[in-house]
Amino acid sequence: MNAWMQDVMGADAAQLGAATHRRASAAHKKPEATAEGAKPEEEGHEFAHDFPFPVKKVKVAGGRVEISLSLLVGVACQAAQDKGGSPGKLDPKTIAKAAARFIVGWSDTAVMPAVSGGAGLWKTLKVERSGMGLVASSETETSIGKFALEFTLIKLSAGAETGDKAGAKLTLKAAEASAKLTPHRVALPDLVMDGIRFSKITLQAGAQITLAPDWPVVLGKWAAQEIAGDAALEAGEVVATVVGAEIIIAGSLIAVGLSTIFGTLHSVAQGAQIGDLAMAAKFGVDKARAGFKLAMSGYKPPSDPLMLAGYQAGLQNRQALLDQLKKQYDGADENDLKQAIAGHADEAVKQAEATIQTALRTGLWDGYLAANTRFLTHKDGEWAYVACFGNLPKESDPEWKKFTDHHSGVF
């Protein structure tokens, strides 16, 4: 008897019954009224349950990589006492024991051959350009569903050659891999097991797929071999941009934290010698944004003081993001990572937009107050506030209180 099945058959009645009740509805159907002389419809149970299988390790991708496959087979059916079976109580545990028998048989004849037969899953690999990088994918259609593998690629070697030498010179590493099963719903014919008649049977196999730890290198080598045999992908301009820029930088592009960006911008804006406060506030945000983008894109610093404020904040963020990517993709070419960051400069500016605005405007305001500690009237402060923030101050505004706390008696 299958070891997994032995576990099911020997399971504690209370445990199995409780588990089945959590996943199934096993209420008896009452006999319905029938025409005169006809027999009432047979009593039945609606049964649904998920049966986990032990983790199985199999070789895939032509034997290149090993995966751990954790299967969960779900069954939904109707169960009733077979006319030829011995009478007795039909409870969830009894149904589960019988169902386990035909599920093990289905697993042996359909599931396992689908994932481990022949050379295994994912026999061929398709490599395509996506944005600034390359994405590799493979799919295998089986009787239980479609197994899909997808991963991005980063380049570890600089100056890769093309032509016959491409495969030897190009060193790739896989990143951000995804392996999943999109299951089919499989219908089985009615059957009798242990005196129970099962009808309207549908099965569906779910799977958690875990790649072996060496998958980044193994899949990278596989992709490099495919590129070496594809004239379109051998082109120098494609090989030179194997970065995966649109995918390898996932999540927030603000690596230093918004508080750091605020502090840098505020400090520079506060210390800048601004002649026309109104004009500085009106165009300052645009200048700070432009400076931030210049730094994220790898350009030299500007001379304008407000552009420089944004530039210094962007430079700190770019370096922190670069350090983060170096740890994530150990061995990747630094120039490739910088290129990937530059490709996300616009998005980084959007993520920092609110902080840039607040830091620049409060920085100009604080700089104005620091430079004018004496002889400020209420009108002076009001004009400066409007110039910095674009609206009249409210008495409850903490920024306006900075002024009134020091100049409340001067009108």
Image: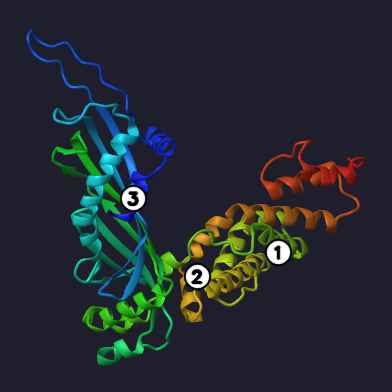
Question: In the displayed structure, would residue 163 be above or below residue 31?
Answer: below
Amino acid type at image mark 1: Thr
- Which numbered marker is on residue 6? 3
Q: Which residue is mark 1?
A: 264
Question: Badge 1, how many Cα within 10 Å: few under 14, some, many 20+?
Answer: many
Picture quadrant where residue 158 is located:
bottom left
In which quadrant will I find the C terminus?
Answer: top right
Residue 353 appears anywhere in the view: yes
Question: Badge 2, how many Cα within 10 Å: few under 14, some, many 20+?
Answer: many
Question: In the displayed structure, would residue 30 be above or below residue 390?
Answer: above
Considering only order in the chain, which callout, 3 or 1, is on the residue closer to the N terminus? 3
Front: mark 3 or 2: 3
Amino acid type at image mark 3: Gln
Q: Residue at x 50, y 75 (%)?
A: 338
Instruction: Compare residues 34 and 265 and report the one nearer the observer.
Output: 34
- Which numbered marker is on residue 341? 2
Front: mark 1 or 3: 3
